[in-house]
Each structure stands twice: as structure tokens, then as C-alpha cells.
Image: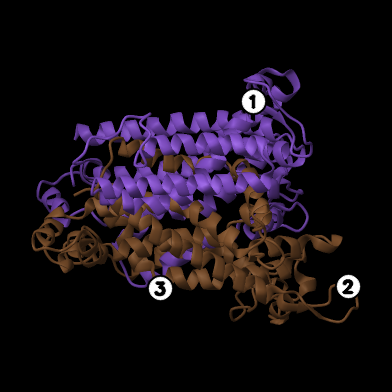
Chain colours: A purple, B brown
């Protein structure tokens, strides 16, 4: 709104309001401090850098009467300390050989990346986990979108008791994943479980779902889709109820078929929200680990990249290799996300 | 869109909406589907009121009542409330005297940590969202994308430097540490959502107020904020659901004084080497579900209205 009255300083101009320089300097000093100083000292250096970045934003905002800068400062400061700095710290770590149970640390350049991609034993497990993750992303997100969409269609009307039935469908999302996961192991249990009891009384033979890869994947996808379809439903439902009534009335006058009515009237209204749901759920699906840990512990070839990462970084203490894998993963997610956003933007401009 | 009421009408929640009417027939149809969808939750709740020895019975016991003879007797169990008691007080060793399990403390921790961090993220994030929406920087979208990126990495990668930082500052296991982390955890999502709400507001009213001499802060509090109350409620509920059940950060960052229920739940059911204590787990989860269920139920209208308002283009 307020056009900048003063020209922005160049990147390497040493003035207090040059926030871009402050961010770069803050990150550089923070990373060097963490790499070289003892942890206690480096914490205060990072804290001081966060304050410096915050101060640069505030001074810049006052100087240019730019209130937006003041408004975003607290958020930037919190994100700098808790998110952006740790992200870059692990990015830096991925270029070093470091194990969290040892003191030594040395620079190895791109070796960690080469190792996780080509080292014959490790690389095979990594690729395998990545392929499995891709499969889970496609299956869980597809299942959630379909189920969420159908549920939303069901609730996109006013009918008696709607409020009370809607909350029933929303409840799976509110369960703790620990409890939900543990109870799904019970539902799938070959001896005590409900599923095997039902199957056994139909076929007469003992039924073990998690025995094969297909069964294990189906079990995990079902549990995940059950928990998170309500999230998709909420977003789609919001789109469905926002379609103006006069459009449907006009369509009724023109005797438009239900199929065309959906594609020409309803779909444009929910497309943006479907995209948003797809984006959020894909990002989350890439992080799928807890249900796999609870249901199969990675057995039957269901290891995902996130669970693999927990093993490498936490159980085998290979922090720097874990960081390298996660940055390869981040790269894939960023490419996918940008693809989504590009398609969404191009479509919305096309109309 | 000059007055507040028309905002919600325009959204189509009242008369002008494309939402059709349907009668009790549709209610019956939806009730059947919703009931089937709810069954796994219902089973957890029923397990919470089951006698412990029936938890793994074959055939599984399914209902506390025979529904006037509809359900055969072998699937029916006699309900009991003692599992809820043993959440808070039970004997830790075989035959030992009942001890306090500390779950009253963990429930308090969960409520305190989630509500403070979600509210904090809401305050900070709403300010930032207003900034991003009304005073866009050059490369605004890039900054927003970087903020979203903070949600893309698995928690395990971000957590190592965070643990080191908190340990160095002497804050590990404190409320400050976990609340700060959860605030950041919720910020990305809060900023994205609230920005889309602010983007949808008409600028005419704000400009008019500015011409009438209101300050920038006055415009924000008097004009813009009241129009996005529904959005605030929606963001609050979403954030609360995610924070309430968060497990990995809590496992690695909370100490014995600040432990949250999901972590304590995990420990309670898997400790002692006796395998999963099903009725205890179900009782904890059922109690843990009640607060978030009530909040969602009472904010449900806002939730729907809010999501629409934020993301649907005019």
C-alpha cells in the first residue's frame, strides 16, 4: 500500500536497515558459530543474530514508514530461530561427516549425497524407501481425495441433524495417531482382530491381512485415509456450499444435465480448494512414518523414507547422512509443490 | 460488501446458497454412512468401558447393550467405569498398592501447551498475514513459499539442532521450549490461512477508514480483524487438532514435568513388558478426545464458514 519512499539499499551496503544483508549475515554467523563454538556459546550467538535480524526489519520498517515490516517481524523472528535456522543447520550438516554419538566432524563436500545415492548397500535401501513413499503418497492422497469428496457431496445439503452427523465423520481426525495406530493393529490382528474374525466366519480359514506386501500396504493406506479424509472433506465442503444458488437455478431453466452442471458450475468453485487439499495432504503424506512404525515396523517392504530417516538419524546416529537424504526429499517435494501451484495458477488465469 | 452481515450471506450459508434442502430420508442415508465411518472410534470408546479381561476376547465383544435382543449375547459385555479410574491411579507392580500415575498433570500439560502455543501462533501469524496481504514485499510469494517449506521436512531433521539449542540454553524439558517450537510449527499454516482470509476482504472499507483519519493500527483492529473472526476460529481449530495430537516433537522435547498425553499414553501402554494394555489405552484416548471434540463441535459453524471465506475467490 505505502509505496517505498526511499530506494532499498544494495545488498552489501552496511546500514542498520539493510535487512537482506542482516539475514545473510545472521545465518552465516549462526552456522559458523554452531560448527565451531561449544553448544552453550553458540546458542547465544544464534539468539543475538535473531535479534539483529529482527532489529534490521524494525529499523527498515520505521525508516520507510513500512508497517508491513513491523507486522511480519515477530513471525520472522520465531521462524528464524525455530525453523529456518535448524533447516539451514541441517543443510550445512549434510556436507560434513558427523555422527551424533561422536565428537569428530569434518567437511566432506557432496560425499554424503553421493553415498546415499550410489553406495551399493545403503543406496538400495534408500531408493527402495523412496519408491515405497511415492507409492504411499499416490495411494493415500488418492484415497483421501475420493473419500473426502464423496463425504463432502453427502453433507452439501441442509438436512435434519446435519451438525451432529458431521462431527461423527470429523472425529477420526482428532484421534491421537498412537491410539489409532495401535487399535488398527488390533483390528487387523490375525487371532483377536475384528477383520480376521469376520473373514474367518465367511471363508472358514484364518485370515492374515498384514502377511503380504499388498495386504500391509492396504492396511496402512486404509488407516491413513480413514484418519485424514475428513480434512479433505472440510475443504471440499467449504467449496460446495459457496456455489451461488442462482447458477443452479439458471442451469435448471436451461435443462443442463447433472454431469455438465457439475463440471461447468460446481467444479470451478471447488477446484482451488481441491488443489489446496492436494497440496497439504501430499506434503503430509511424504512424512508418513508413525502409522508404518505402529502397523508393520517397516516389515513386508513397507519402509518409507521418513521412517528410514528416523532409523538412520536417531538409531544409527548418522545425522549427516540423514540430513542429506532429507534434503533430497525436500527437493522432490518442492518440485512437486511448485508444479501444483503452477498448474493451479495457470488454470485460474485461464478462466 | 459494505456491512458485516452481507459477508456471510454472500458466502451462501443462508438464503442465497446453492445448498439444497433435503429431508429425513437423506438424514437416514447419511446417518448410516457416518455411523460406519465412526465405528472404529466407537470401538475404542467401548473398549474404554469394557472389563479388562474381555479386551482380547474371541469373538470380540462389541456392545455394552444387547439393544433389546438385537445383538447376540456373546457380543455383549457389561460396562464398567474402572478403566477411567486406573488412568489416574493404579498399582504399578503386580499386587502393589495403587499409585498416582501423574496423568492429571499430563492432561493439564497438554491443554496448557496446545492452547498457549496455538493462540500465540494465531496472534503472531495473523499480524504477519496482514502484513503479507496488505504490504506485499517484492518477492512476497517467494517468502510465503519459504515459510511453507518449513513444514515439508520430516520433524526428525529439524529436531536435532533444536534439541542442541535448548540444551545449551538450559531450556530442555521446559514449557518455554515446547511452546516456542509448537508456535513455530503452527505459524506456517496460520500465516497461509489467515493471509488468504485477508486477501478476500474488500479494500474499500479500509481505504474509507484511512481517509477518515484512522491509523494503520486502528484500521486493522476496527475494520479488518472483526471481518475474519470466522477465519480465526477455523485456523484455531485446525491448529489445535494438529498440536493436540503431535507426538514426535513432544517425545523428544518434553521432560517428566512437561510431558504431554500422547507421549505418556505411548509409555503407559507399552511399559512393563506385558504387551499393550488395551482398556487403559482406550480409556486414556477417550478422555483425551473429549476436550478437542467439544471445541470442534462448538466452533463447527465457524470452521465451515471460515474455510469458505478464506479460500473461495469471488
Sequence order check, earlier mark of 3 and 2: 2
For the residues marked 1 and 3, what is the alpha-carbon distance in whole angstroms?
Answer: 46 Å
Badge 1 vs badge 3, beta-carbon distance below 8 Å: no
The residue identified by callout 3 is: B298
Q: Residue at x 72, y 70 (%)?
A: B279
Occupied quadrant, residue B232: bottom left
Residue A21 in view here: yes
Instruction: Name the chain under label 1.
Output: A
Q: Secondary structure at mark 2?
A: loop
Q: Which mark is residue B93?
A: 2
Q: Residue at x 67, y 45 (%)?
A: A39
Label 1 neighbour load within 10 Å: few <14, some 14-19, many 20+: some
Q: Secondary structure at mark 3?
A: helix
Q: Is residue B242 left or right of residue A295?
A: left
Q: Return the x and y of residue A177 as percentages of the image width and height.
A: 61, 56
Vertical comparison of B195 with A100: above or below = below
Give whichever of B76, B303 is nearer the camera: B303
The total number of labels drawn is 3
Amino acid at each position: 500500500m505505502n509505496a517505498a519512499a526511499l530506494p532499498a539499499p544494495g545488498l552489501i551496503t552496511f546500514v542498520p536497515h539493510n535487512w537482506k544483508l542482516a539475514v545473510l549475515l545472521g545465518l552465516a554467523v549462526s552456522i559458523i558459530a554452531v560448527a565451531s563454538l561449544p553448544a552453550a556459546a553458540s546458542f547465544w550467538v544464534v539468539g543475538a543474530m535473531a535479534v539483529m535480524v529482527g532489529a534490521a526489519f524494525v529499523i527498515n520498517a520505521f525508516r520507510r514508514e513500512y508497517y508491513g515490516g513491523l507486522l511480519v517481524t515477530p513471525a520472522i523472528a520465531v521462524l528464524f530461530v525455530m525453523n529456518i535456522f535448524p533447516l539451514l543447520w541441517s543443510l550445512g550438516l549434510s556436507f560434513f561427516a558427523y555422527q551424533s554419538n561422536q565428537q569428530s566432524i569434518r567437511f566432506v563436500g557432496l560425499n554424503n549425497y553421493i553415498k546415499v545415492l550410489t553406495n551399493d548397500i545403503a543406496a538400495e535401501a534408500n531408493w527402495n524407501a523412496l519408491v515405497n513413499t511415492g507409492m504411499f503418497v499416490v495411494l493415500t492422497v488418492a484415497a483421501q481425495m475420493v473419500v473426502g469428496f464423496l463425504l463432502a457431496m453427502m453433507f452439501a445439503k441442509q438436512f435434519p441433524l446435519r451438525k451432529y452427523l458431521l462431527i461423527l465423520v470429523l472425529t477420526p481426525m482428532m484421534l491421537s495417531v498412537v491410539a489409532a495406530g495401535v487399535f488398527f493393529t488390533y483390528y487387523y490382528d490375525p487371532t483377536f482382530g475384528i477383520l480376521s474374525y469376520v473373514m474367518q466366519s465367511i471363508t472358514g480359514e484364518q485370515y492374515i491381512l498384514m502377511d503380504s506386501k499388498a495386504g500391509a500396504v492396504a492396511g496402512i493406506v486404509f488407516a491413513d485415509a480413514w484418519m485424514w479424509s475428513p480434512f479433505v472433506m472440510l475443504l471440499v465442503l467449504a467449496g460446495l456450499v459457496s456455489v451461488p444458488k442462482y447458477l443452479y437455478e439458471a442451469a435448471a431453466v436451461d435443462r443442463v444435465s447433472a454431469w455438465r452442471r457439475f463440471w461447468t458450475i460446481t467444479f470451478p468453485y471447488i477446484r482451488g480448494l481441491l488443489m489446496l487439499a492436494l497440496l497439504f495432504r501430499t506434503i503430509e503424506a511424504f512424512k508418513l512414518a508413525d502409522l508404518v512404525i505402529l502397523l508393520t515396523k517397516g516389515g513386508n517392504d513397507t519402509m518409507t523414507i521418513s521412517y528410514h530417516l528416523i532409523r538412520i538419524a536417531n538409531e544409527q546416529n548418522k545425522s549427516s547422512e540423514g540430513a542429506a537424504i532429507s534434503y533430497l526429499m525436500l527437493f522432490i517435494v518442492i518440485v512437486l509443490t511448485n508444479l501444483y501451484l503452477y498448474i493451479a495458477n495457470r488454470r485460474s488465469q485461464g478462466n | 460488501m459494505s456491512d458485516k452481515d452481507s459477508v456471510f450471506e454472500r458466502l451462501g450459508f443462508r438464503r442465497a446458497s446453492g445448498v439444497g434442502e433435503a429431508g429425513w430420508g437423506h438424514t437416514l442415508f447419511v446417518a448410516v454412512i457416518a455411523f460406519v465411518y465412526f465405528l472404529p472410534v466407537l470401538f475404542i470408546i467401548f473398549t474404554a468401558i469394557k472389563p479388562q479381561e474381555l479386551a482380547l476376547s474371541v469373538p470380540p465383544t462389541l456392545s455394552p447393550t444387547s439393544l433389546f435382543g438385537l445383538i447376540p449375547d456373546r457380543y455383549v459385555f457389561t460396562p464398567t467405569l474402572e478403566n477411567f479410574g486406573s488412568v489416574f491411579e493404579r498399582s504399578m507392580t503386580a499386587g502393589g498398592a495403587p499409585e498416582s500415575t501423574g496423568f492429571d498433570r499430563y492432561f493439564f500439560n497438554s491443554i496448557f501447551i496446545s492452547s498457549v502455543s496455538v493462540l500465540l501462533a494465531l496472534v503472531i501469524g495473523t499480524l504477519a498475514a496482514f502484513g503479507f496481504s496488505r504490504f506485499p514485499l517484492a518477492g512476497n510469494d517467494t517468502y510465503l513459499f519459504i515459510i511453507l517449506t518449513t513444514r515439508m521436512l520430516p520433524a526428525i531433521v529439524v529436531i536435532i539442532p533444536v534439541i542442541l539449542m535448548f540444551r545449551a540454553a538450559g531450556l530442555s524439558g521446559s514449557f518455554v521450549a515446547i511452546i516456542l517450537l509448537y508456535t513455530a510449527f503452527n505459524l506456517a499454516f496460520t500465516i497461509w490461512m489467515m493471509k488468504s482470509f485477508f486477501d478476500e476482504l474488500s479494500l474499500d472499507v479500509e481505504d474509507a477508514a484511512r481517509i477518515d483519519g484512522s491509523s494503520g493500527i486502528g484500521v486493522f483492529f476496527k475494520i479488518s480483524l472483526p471481518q475474519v473472526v470466522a477465519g480465526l476460529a477455523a485456523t484455531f481449530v485446525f491448529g489445535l487438532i494438529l498440536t493436540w495430537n503431535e507426538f514426535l516433537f513432544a517425545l523428544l522435547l518434553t521432560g517428566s514435568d512437561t510431558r504431554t498425553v500422547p507421549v505418556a499414553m505411548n509409555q503407559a501402554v507399552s511399559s512393563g513388558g506385558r504387551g499393550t494394555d488395551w482398556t487403559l489405552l482406550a480409556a486414556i484416548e477417550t478422555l483425551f478426545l473429549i476436550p478437542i471434540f467439544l471445541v470442534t463441535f462448538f466452533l463447527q459453524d465457524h470452521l465451515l464458514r471460515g474455510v469458505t471465506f478464506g479460500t473461495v475467490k469471488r
